[in-house]
Amino acid sequence: AAKFGPDGTQIWSQVYNGTIFPGGLNSNEAANDFAVGDSGNLYVVGNNQGVVGGQNAFLIKLNGTTGALQLSATMNGNLNSADAFYGVAYDSGNMGVYVTGVETQTIGSGNLVVKKYNVGGALQWTRTESGPGSLGDSGRGISIHASGDLIVTGQKMIAAGNARGWLMRMPANGGASLWSAEFNGNVNNSVTIGRRVSQVANPASMSYVVGTVMTSIGNQDGYIGQFDNGT
């Protein structure tokens, strides 16, 4: 992670590896998203290599002034396999940090997962969502609606090799999703993924999603869509 001034001057740079986590290795770490939170501090999510070969999801909090590590939290699914956090959002109203990603369950299967942490790194709740057979669903982006609800995007596996983009709204208390929508490319049995979602301040009833879709065999294009949040 690095911080730059308005003129492009680097203010600080910090490199962290998996050894900062219990049982972590210095191997195959990746930061996937970040959000600016309380007092300008940074919340960074990603994945790191575990000791026994599994991939764990992580959340770290960095001091916005110095880049110093303030706290860390990890998630290791039932299979100790390819877990990851891909999206993070900070809610200043509730002083909470929301993350989304994938939590592996069995070989070849995973669920979309959403978790809430407080600013001290303590887990508040966990919510999982899955498509048919939990074949590899995942959350990729998350944002806060004006009401405080969460808007999450990602992918929903319908069958092996067939994924649709997924958008859902869920309450900030971790309850069941209020609604969900799917979007797909022009090719059946293709892979479509929503990767980031953003709210429109006015009107607050709209979400924009960006991702990737397959428009023909071997041809993957960028995607942007506008959705009504149902308010």
Image: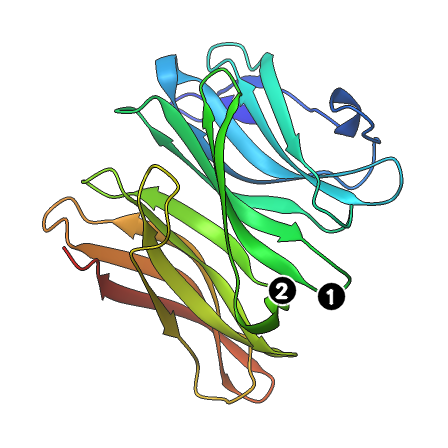
Across and down, in percent, residue 166 comes to: 42, 65
Picture layout, residue 153 above or below residue 116: below
The dot on residue 36 is: none
Amino acid type, residue under disc 2 in the picture: Gly
Residues at circles 2 and 1 in contact by the CB criterion of under 8 Å: yes
Q: Residue at x 78, y 23 (%)?
A: 22
The crowding category of the residue bearing disc 2, from other C-alpha atoms within 10 Å (few below 14, some 14 to 19, many at least 20), is many
Amino acid type, residue under disc 1 in the picture: Gly
Across and down, in percent, residue 153 comes to: 41, 57
- Residue bearing the label numbered 1: 108
Across and down, in percent, residue 170 comes to: 33, 49
Q: Nearer the viewer, residue 92 or 211?
A: 92
> In this rendering, would 51 be left or right of 6?
right
Q: How is the image coloured?
A: rainbow
Q: Nearer the viewer, residue 174 or 145?
A: 174
Q: Please, which residue is most extreme toward the right here?
A: 52
Across and down, in percent, residue 123 comes to: 52, 27
* Quadrant including the N terminus: top right
Picture layout, residue 135 above or below residue 19: below
Describe the element under mark 1 as helix, strand or loop: loop
* Quadrant including the C terminus: bottom left
Q: Please, which residue is most extreme toward the left here?
A: 203
The crowding category of the residue bearing disc 1, from other C-alpha atoms within 10 Å (few below 14, some 14 to 19, many at least 20), is few
Q: Residue at x 27, y 43 (%)?
A: 149
Q: Residue at x 29, y 24 (%)?
A: 92
Picture layout, residue 220 above or below residue 38: below
Describe the element under mark 2 as helix, strand or loop: loop
- Residue bearing the label numbered 2: 136
> In this rendering, would 185 be left or right of 200?
right
Q: Determine the CA span between mark 2 and mark 1.
A: 7 Å
